[in-house]
Amino acid sequence: MANKKPKKPDSSKVKFWNPNKIISISAISISVWTLLVLLYQTRVINQQFELARETQYASALPYLELTHSFTFESYEISLVNTGVGPAFIKKVKIMENGDSIASDIAIFLQEIPVTNNPGMMVQYSNLMVGKVIPAGQELIIFKISNAESASREIREYLEQSDIRPYIEYASIYDHRWAVTGLFLPPEPIP
């Protein structure tokens, strides 16, 4: 038998896993993981930013309520800001069957026939565009006193008619809502 010589490695065949490839693949893997971590951190930071912005908006949120109170001799309609921020009045009108019939609530209420009784005291505040209702404040829009029958008549008239106030207001961030009736919650305006 002839002696076989060990084969020399072919210089044209190089090993696949050489140190250069291992270092390159490691660097690419680390870069991909770094990118994924950065994307996750960016998403978390955006969520925190949105939460901070919502908190900031909520810290200045006005909440207007239109209420009325009555006794045997008096009747009162008030606008109360029970929110934590000021309310900027943007629109005021009286609606009947979907149509605007007046732009001043107090003047409209004074023109109702039952408000012309002699001896009756009428107080009102004009609610107009641009007025600011601070947080925790109440604005008496309309009040009659010293009028036994008129108090009952005006309350019944307003409860039975299709007449509704429309008061649009905004927060300091210009988010808008509308009050559309007594004891109704404000409706957001997109």
Image (tube, rainbow, N blue to C red):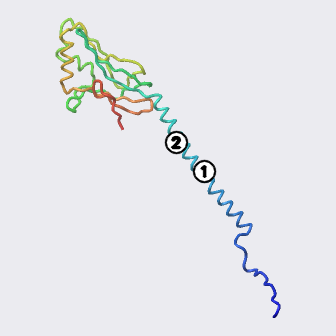
- Regarding residue 91, the answer to whether it shows in the image is no
Instruction: Say whether residue 179 is left or right of residue 112.
Output: right
Q: Residue at x 72, y 79 (%)?
A: 13
Q: Residue at x 42, y 21 (%)?
A: 135
Nearest to the observer: residue 132 or residue 46 = 46
Quick check: 76 above or below 130?
above
Nearest to the observer: residue 86 or residue 54 = 54
For mark 1, give the secondary structure.
Answer: helix
Q: Residue at x 61, y 54 (%)?
A: 35
Mark 2–mark 1 CB contact (< 8 Å): no
- Specify the quadrant of the image occupied by residue 81: top left
- Specify the quadrant of the image occupied by residue 181: top left
Percent coordinates x, y for residue 184 in the rendering? 30, 27
Give how far apart the Cα atoms at labels 2 and 1 are.
15 Å
Percent coordinates x, y for residue 69 in the rendering? 28, 15
**Amino acid marked by disc 2:** Gln
Quick check: 4 above or below 50?
below
Instruction: Say whether residue 132 is left or right of residue 147.
Output: right
Residue beneath disc 1: 37
Q: Check disc 1: other Cα within 10 Å, few if <14, some if 14-19, many if 20+.
A: few
Quick check: 151 above or below 162?
above
Q: How many marks?
A: 2
Label drawn at residue 47: 2
Percent coordinates x, y for residue 142 in the rendering? 28, 16
Q: Give whichever of discs 2 and 1 has the lower sequence position.
A: 1
- Specify the quadrant of the image occupied by residue 182: top left
**Amino acid marked by disc 1:** Val
The residue sitting at the front extreme is: 1
- Regarding residue 57, the answer to whether it shows in the image is yes
Look at the image and tell me in which quarter the C terminus lies: top left
